[in-house]
Image: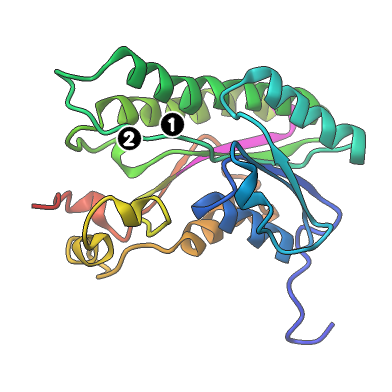
Amino acid sequence: MSSTDPPQIFRDKVAIVTGAGTGIGRAVALALAESSCTVYVNDLDEAPLKQLPDTPLLIPHPADAADPEAMRSLVGRAIRDFGRLDYVVANAGTTRFASFLSASEEDFDAVVKLNLRGTFFLVQAAANAMAGTGGSIVLMSSNISHRAYPNLTTYSMTKAAINMMARSLALELGPLGININALAPGATLTERTAQEGEDYEGTWSALIPTGRVAQPEDIARAATFLLSEAARQISGTVLVVDGGWSGVGRHPG
């Protein structure tokens, strides 16, 4: 192997990454594939999956991550195809900005259905498949799971629940050889967040101690660490990747 060859730390492993058509999920899937992992790349929208690099390591799987049966089918496909499932990154999620006093039942249900229900039953199916062979699971949380933020009460509630899910399941899944953690990104420049304001990157860079917003690759590096053997003794924790913003807590003006 030459010095320019990609690392092989995930060779012969199989992963599922949900919400991976764009943004953080896509970056995680690409990082795993670059380390020789076979990745089922899930997204509700089939169009971005068609833009994935042409490699047998990236297997598109369009499906609704909020649908428990669809997630059970995805896990089942991995087991049928390869006889194993080593990693899951439950990244699919949605955000609905709304004042608490005016939030609709529709908005509430949409956020809870994907962020919590979808995550819960994907992990349940994956853990049943991993039992006996072990594996690693990363749940996608947010730094506002523990800091108040305007007009995102429902979203932040679901992400706080994700943190507790990781802590609770560390107890139940540990004896099965499965470690599970939550990853809590801060402001990250993605296709979606770039549309949240006129200058998302500039606004948030001024508020973050490191002086810059995260790129999806920053979050992907943290996710692959939590999945790797280097993190096997880490379980039930929440890793915050936000450039120190949580310690400052300044909001855009």
Q: Is residue 129 visible?
A: yes
What amino acid type is highlighted by mark number 1? Asn
- Tell me what residue is drawn at x 62 percent, y 45 percent: 233
- Tell me what residue is drawn at x 35 percent, y 16 percent: 106
Q: Which numbered marker is on residue 163?
A: 1
Task: Name the side, left or right, on which 32 lies relative to 133.
Answer: left
- Distance from disc 2 to disc 1, alpha carbons, whole Å, reads 8 Å
Task: Read off the residue under disc 2.
Answer: 145
Give the image quarter of residue 220: bottom right
Q: How is the image coloured?
A: rainbow
Looking at the image, do the residues carrying marks 2 and 1 touch, with CB atoms under 8 Å apart? yes
- Tell me what residue is drawn at x 65 percent, y 58 percent: 51
- For the residue labelled by badge 2, is the local secondary structure a helix, a strand or a loop? helix
Task: Name the side, left or right, on which 233 lies relative to 129.
Answer: left
Q: Is residue 90 above or below residue 53?
A: above
Q: Nearer the viewer, residue 47 or 41?
A: 47
Q: Is residue 225 visible?
A: no
What amino acid type is highlighted by mark number 2? Ser
Choose the circle earlier in sequence order: 2 or 1: 2
- For the residue labelled by badge 1, is the local secondary structure a helix, a strand or a loop? helix
Residue 92 screen position, x and y as percent: 53, 37
Residue 195 screen position, x and y as percent: 31, 53
The magenta region covers 175-183
Q: Main secondary structure of the magenta part?
A: strand
